[in-house]
Amino acid sequence: MQRIKKYSLAAVFLTIGMLSLAGCSSGNNTAKNDSTTPKTMETKDLQDKIGKSDWVIVDTRSNDAFNGWKLDGVKKGGHIKGATDFSANWLKVDAKDKDKTLKETLKTKGITTEKNVVLYDANGKDADKVAEYLTKNGIKNIYKYDVKKWASDDKLAMESYANYQMLVPASWVNDLMDGKKPETYTGTPYKVFEVSWGDESKSPDYLKEGHIKGAVHINTDEVEEGPLWNRLSDDRLKKFAENNGITANTTVILYGADSMPSFRVGVILKYMGVKDVRVLNGGTASWKNAGYALEKTSDKKVPVESFGAAVPSNKGYIIDLPQAKEIIADKQNSKLVDIRSWDEYIGKTSGYDYIKPKGRPAGAVWGHAGTDASHLQDYRNIDNTMRNKDEILAMWKQSGITPDQRLAFYCGTGWRAAEVLTYADVMGLKNISLYDGGWNEWSGNTGNPANPIETGEPKK
């Protein structure tokens, strides 16, 4: 009371008036918020802001929650339609050029100083962390919202990816291994595999750095071989699955320090006919960031007698050279999508020391990738989780790639394209496949006019 007496009556009224202007508890109030502490927004106000050009709604939770998982006690999974994402987890990543990448991400998502920004979370922490970062970068008009309120209202929809269950959070894997029955798990036998190239004794990711308890190592040589690095024959793939204890009804969880090999094996397993294939979103880092331990002992493969289904049972999921040519010929309804760097696409480099020819299959369209054969930044967030659907589709639209078309993805030898195929599957696209041979196979007959090659920027 002593402090209040020191203020004049006019100052008190002035303060009340300012708070009324800055508040966001009712109506269509769009006043600027100059406070460093975000104001709380209620559901009715948030509904009014969605879609307005001077407002941006931001999901600050994990990528898994944005995709569709019910995390932190929310009643419905997914995100508010019209929201973009900027996860608080991204602020914890130790990455090269982190500050530059995050600032570019803000720009891409339209989170700028000119906008009113609504940050929402479900744990009461993520929005505050992102608000602090935005404030440091000159963004002042910040509000926050508890998404549990939206999710608990049966009249308000949340948007989830059609097959979000294909990318699992670390907590889901941990619950599964603790004997629980997490969301979307049907109770089938499961196996966890760490996937990387090389024998487990030589793999730095399995024994030296450690792996999820109980995880068995898969060497990518178990599913493909040179010189083309195509998948093995169907008979050999069947033996690979049986040797690893995998049947068509096994729930298979794949992960690694780099997720790309996991996606490669995952696509092959889906082609074979495994019904439930999952990849740990963000790989080993997401497991460690969640606070879960790794072990450094060897877990041996436990074989099964039979895969339990014909191989392949999902034949169209991977295609070969004849089908790739059919897709290129059907320009109006189909696209052969190049998941390589721009320099590989235009023929400046082959991208591989064992692939000499440069260029692309004539008629293929560029689908973006990363800076070289080991990167896929255009499809990943800074924590190596999947980039959001709207941004991927916008990127494709620039090359005339649309979800209603028949799409086959290729790269040099199938790794990058397998990851993008999985993302397309997560998003719910239907007529999609991996062209397994990719540039390595297509360019092998450089003197054959049946495999025409283009270089340079495509003609418009």
Image: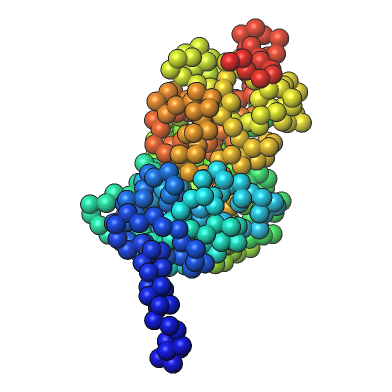
In the picture, the quarter occupied by the C terminus is top right
- Residue 353 picture quarter: top right
Residue 126 at x, y = what percent?
Answer: 48, 63
Q: Residue at x 43, y 83 (%)?
A: 8
Q: Is residue 394 above or below residue 276?
A: above
Q: Does 441 sit left or right of 323 as displayed? A: right
Frontmost residue, 242 versus 357: 357
Q: Residue at x 23, y 54 (%)?
A: 154
In the picture, the quarter occupied by the N terminus is bottom left
| Residue 359 visible, this orientation | no
Looking at this rendering, what residue extends furthest in the top direction?
Answer: 449
Looking at this rendering, what residue extends furthest in the bottom direction?
Answer: 2
What colour-coding does the image apply? rainbow
Residue 206 at x, y = what percent?
Answer: 64, 55
- Residue 412 picture quarter: top right
Residue 167 at x, y = what percent?
Answer: 46, 48
Q: Residue at x 70, y 13 (%)?
A: 446
| Residue 432 visible, this orientation | yes
Residue 178 at x, y = what percent?
Answer: 43, 65
Q: Does 158 sit left or right of 136 as displayed? A: left
Mark count: 0
Q: Residue at x 69, y 17 (%)?
A: 455
Looking at this rendering, what residue extends furthest in the left direction?
Answer: 155
